[in-house]
Image (tube, grey):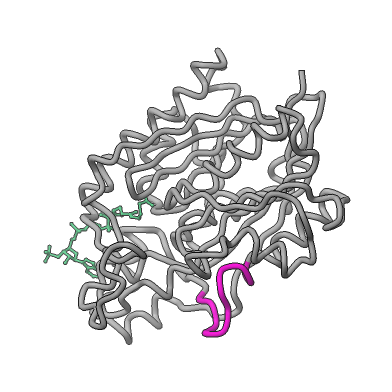
Amino acid sequence: MIYSRIAGTGRYLPERVLTNADLEKMVDTSDEWIRTRTGVERRHIAADEQSTSDLCLEAARQAFDAAGVTKDDVDLIVVGTTTPDLLFPNIGTLIQEKLDIHGCPAFSVEAACTGFLYALSTADKFVRAGEAKCALVVGAEILSKIVDWKDRTTCVLFGDGAGAVILQPSEEQGIISTHLGADGQYKDLLYYPYGASKELHKTHLPDAKIMMKGNEVFKVAVKTLGGVAEEALRKNNIDKGALDWLVPHQANLRIIQATAKRLGLPMEKVILTVQDHGNTSAASVPLAFDVAVRDGRIQRGQLVLMEAFGGGFTWGSALLRY
Ligand code: ACO
């Protein structure tokens, strides 16, 4: 049996750092409120001239090096993002052009904070079907450009970044299974109200900001994340105790703690990076994964569960041996 296996990882965070103390000067908030309600301490903000595809480049190059491949080996590019540079060409092709890669399929999937897991699951199927031998899978986001910096209920939560992995075929176990889901009945709890076919033509965009019913998102997120994590273990007949690491979507410390508790996992087995970059949506899982691979916590052969939840709602998990 052929598996797809993560051969290398990379990440990029923009240079500019916005701390909770900086936010205290911008809106009526406090470091204490942000830390206790969300766990976030700082976030990285892209420069005006940077677009989401720019963030992907460094993450991709690091992943190439870690995997021992070059851009010429890449035969598939899949990007999870909700903040692409343009409506078209798709961001996969923009990354392709910037990396001087030609000819391979390149596309993006849009699933809000679950974008990376949707992208990983898609690329996994290409690799296992023998249709790709070196897939670049990226999760990237520049949320700072759609956040309303006067709205304290959302602006303290989000940040910018990119994370990437290279997937290659392997006879050894790699990605064991992925589990995706969605339920559009929750579309009004978390959304951005403008798009290509809806209202973009208007010259005044009074509501051009992320709309979120935070409390309700919180409740469904905790319930769903616990469920999708358990589904991955149950379908593979693997006990929770066998897990070495949980790499959750880095949205909010309290959501992560509640999910870990439901899984009976001690926080020492949970990779936590939300304090350093806030909620980077589709970038958050590969960012956290790369941090833990590079600092030596996640080792080859270990059993890892990734999971995410986002607007839609969408959700997903991936159980893998690194
Ligand atoms: N600073 C200070 N006070 C604030 C701030 C702020 N930044 N934001 C809201 N408040 C106030 C509110 O106005 C409210 O005041 P009131 O009691 O006088 O009315 C009070 O704090 C409590 O507000 P709540 O919304 O009840 O606070 P809660 O404990 O629910 O925390 C939060 C809010 C952090 C948004 C939480 O609901 C949450 O994390 N929800 C999940 C949202 C999320 O993660 N979304 C990301 C996308 S989905 C995903 O990635 C999972």
Rendered residue at 56%/38% (across/down): 269
Rendered residue at 42%/63% (across/down): 40
Query: Is residue 55 shown left or right of residue 316?
Result: right
Q: Quadrant of the N terminus?
A: top right
Q: Position of residue 208 (x, y in %)?
A: 27, 73
Furthest-top residue in view? 237
Rendered residue at 66%/54% (across/down): 164
Can you tell which quarter of the image residue 119 is in?
A: top right
Task: Please name whichever residue, 232 or 196, is drawn nearer the observer in this view of the structure.
Answer: 196
Task: Please name whichever residue, 8 or 131, is drawn nearer the observer in this view of the structure.
Answer: 131
Residue 83 seen in render: yes
Indicate whether 254 appears above or below 13: above
Q: Position of residue 261 (x, y in %)?
A: 40, 33
Instruction: Give the quarter the ligand 1 occupies.
Output: bottom left
Query: Is residue 5 shown left or right of residue 50?
Result: right
Residue 295 seen in render: no
Q: Position of residue 72 (x, y in %)?
A: 86, 55
Can you tell which quarter of the image residue 181 is in?
A: top left
Can you tell which quarter of the image residue 236 is in?
A: top right
Q: Position of residue 320 (x, y in %)?
A: 65, 31
Task: Please name whichever residue, 126 or 7, is drawn nearer the observer in this view of the structure.
Answer: 126
| Magenta segment boundaries in residue numbering | 45-55
Rendered residue at 46%/43% (across/down): 308
Indicate whether 130 appears above or below 67: above
Marks counted in the figure total 0
Task: Please name whichever residue, 35 or 225, is drawn nearer the observer in this view of the structure.
Answer: 225
